[in-house]
Image: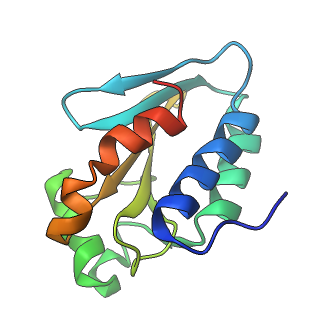
Amino acid sequence: MRPLPSNAFGRMEGACRALLQTTPDDANWNWDREYHAALLILRAGREAALLEQLGSLMPWTWTRHDIGNAPSQVRHVCGIWGGLMVAQRLFVLDPDDDPMLFASWWPWGNRQKFSLRVGCYARSDVVIRADPQRKLQAALGL
């Protein structure tokens, strides 16, 4: 795998391209309007490779047990999304990036399906005006 670019937008796009390469051929990314994030739903048995790739791309990871120790911008995003429940994880590419790329891993109650939502959180006016969500959608082919 090529190293990710040095700027936040470039790293975000590089991570998205890498996720696309790991996505099973029969799974489709969609745009989740409720969460303003890309959404991928996987059936059980298909999640291991994607989860491993996600962990290597986004090395900052939190669960409901340690989210209180996360940087404030990560806790903010987690709060907006309703917190973390049992077995859910929040992955972040780099908490200091603006925009900050993050992904939520949500096992369904029956563990037969898993949701992966990928979003970005912009803090500065300059980055907000650059429309990082549009760039995220483009990077994932949405």
Left or right: residue 138 compared with residue 127: right
Which residue extends farthest top? 26
- Residue at 82% x, 60% y is 2
Q: Residue 20: x and y, percent?
A: 66, 35
Q: How is the image coloured?
A: rainbow
Q: Residue 113: x and y, percent?
A: 53, 25
Name the image quarter holding the N terminus.
Answer: bottom right
- Residue at 20% x, 70% y is 123
Which residue extends farthest right? 1
Given residues 8 and 90, the one toward you in this image is 8
Left or right: residue 142 compared with residue 85: right
- Residue at 38% x, 54% y is 86
Q: Residue 16: x and y, percent?
A: 58, 46
Name the image quarter holding the C terminus.
Answer: top left
Q: Residue 72: x and y, percent?
A: 22, 82
Relative to 57, say whether 131 is above or below.
Answer: above
Given residues 5 and 27, the one toward you in this image is 5
